[in-house]
Image: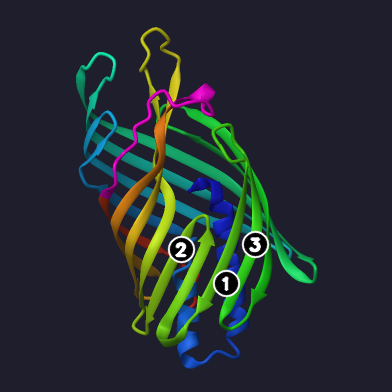
Amino acid sequence: MNKVKISLLVCVLVSQICVAQQAKNDSITQGVIAYLAGKFAAARPLNVEYTHTFPHDYSQGEANRFSQVYASSTFSFIKKPKWVLGATLEYRYQNLDADYTDETSGISTSINDEFHYHQSSLNFLYFSKLFNKMVIYSANVSVDGSDKHFERIKGMAGATLLLKADARTKMAVGLIANIDPSVQFPVIPVFTYERKLDNGYAFDMTLPQRLYIRKYFPKKSRISIGSELNKGADFYVYNLNPANPKQKFEYRQIDLYNGLVYERLLGDNFILTAKTGMRVAIGSGLFDKEESLGDAEIETKPKPAFYANVGLSFNPFIKKKK
């Protein structure tokens, strides 16, 4: 979910700082968890994944197939003791096969089309102290579009306060402000709580983005059960209104992905990820780009559906375990 992406990056950075603090006093089990948690960090320099959503109904018809290829790269090109400047590049290829019935005319139409979406952002982090605790200020400016045009310039700014960081617990709070004409909630509170439990279990929560119970295994893997809020679809649509060919539309869908996640290290730098479960749409619809905060031109209201996801990540910067 792009609205909390900077907060997620900040929380990953907080996790890495806390892992370093744990290294001196963890038990063997806690050390394994800390090591793997750092390896499995959510912000990965290079990530490619494929998601397939199985057939399901929606308010105007039936989606026979929806598949998506997502690729992203997150990197820092200037690192200083007090600040970091980096960038994120994202690309989505989305393929839709659906039957649509117009509610007014009753005419049915078959849709079989592909859509391209990209977003590039410049990210800035600044580290300071507040109430004698670490605070991380963040800012972001991004541009998105399709294979035909650049469309929107967006911005975000926020702050994350690290409340606690010891061998077992990490806790942080923050606020994210969105400068984006398509956002319904301009300010989002963020709360992160991670707790290492006994026997390789861990609790991982970053609200409103994710909630997981995780089980770590010494042989470079972990299994998680829980929920994650993310973009189910995002693309621009053109030439829908013959009376106004220049009118542009944006389809947006936010989904809650519930189920199982399996992650495994391949060597020291690759991560294989597999996910499956039930996808529940939180909000979806086709919006006039210039009136994106108004009512949707078409509310799709997809029904819950099963999904499967497989991904491969590469991180050349993480160190081998000694």
Say few, some or many: other residues with alpha carbon within 10 Å of mark 1 (under 14 / 14 to 19 / 20 or more): some
Residue 321 appears in view: no
Return the residue nearer the eye: 74 or 11: 11
Amino acid identity at mark 1: Gln
**Residue 215 in the figure: left or right of residue 132:** left
Report the Cα–Cα distance between label 1 and label 2.
19 Å
Which residue is the site of mark 1? 16
Return the residue nearer the eye: 197 or 127: 197
Measured from the top left, where is residue 128 in percent x and y?
76, 64
**Residue 111 in the figure: left or right of residue 249:** left
Counting residues from the start of the chain, the first of labels 3 and 1 encountered is 1
Circles 1 and 2: CB distance less than 8 Å? no
Measured from the top left, where is residue 235 in percent x and y?
40, 34
**SS category of the residue bearing label 3:** strand
**SS category of the residue bearing label 1:** helix
Judged by its main secondary structure, the magenta piece is loop
Viewer-nearest of discs 3 and 1: 3
Say few, some or many: other residues with alpha carbon within 10 Å of mark 3 (under 14 / 14 to 19 / 20 or more): some
| Rendered view: 296 above or below 79 | above
Q: Quadrant of residue 184?
A: top right
Amino acid identity at mark 3: Val
Measured from the top left, where is residue 209 in percent x and y?
49, 56
Give the magenta range.
287-305
Say few, some or many: other residues with alpha carbon within 10 Å of mark 2 (under 14 / 14 to 19 / 20 or more): many
> Which disc, if any, is residue 173?
3
Which colour style is shown? rainbow
Which residue is the site of mark 2? 211
The residue under the point 61% across, 68% down is 14
Counting residues from the start of the chain, the first of labels 1 and 2 encountered is 1
- 56 falls in the magenta region: no
The residue under the point 60% across, 89% down is 24
Residue ranking furthest to the top: 243
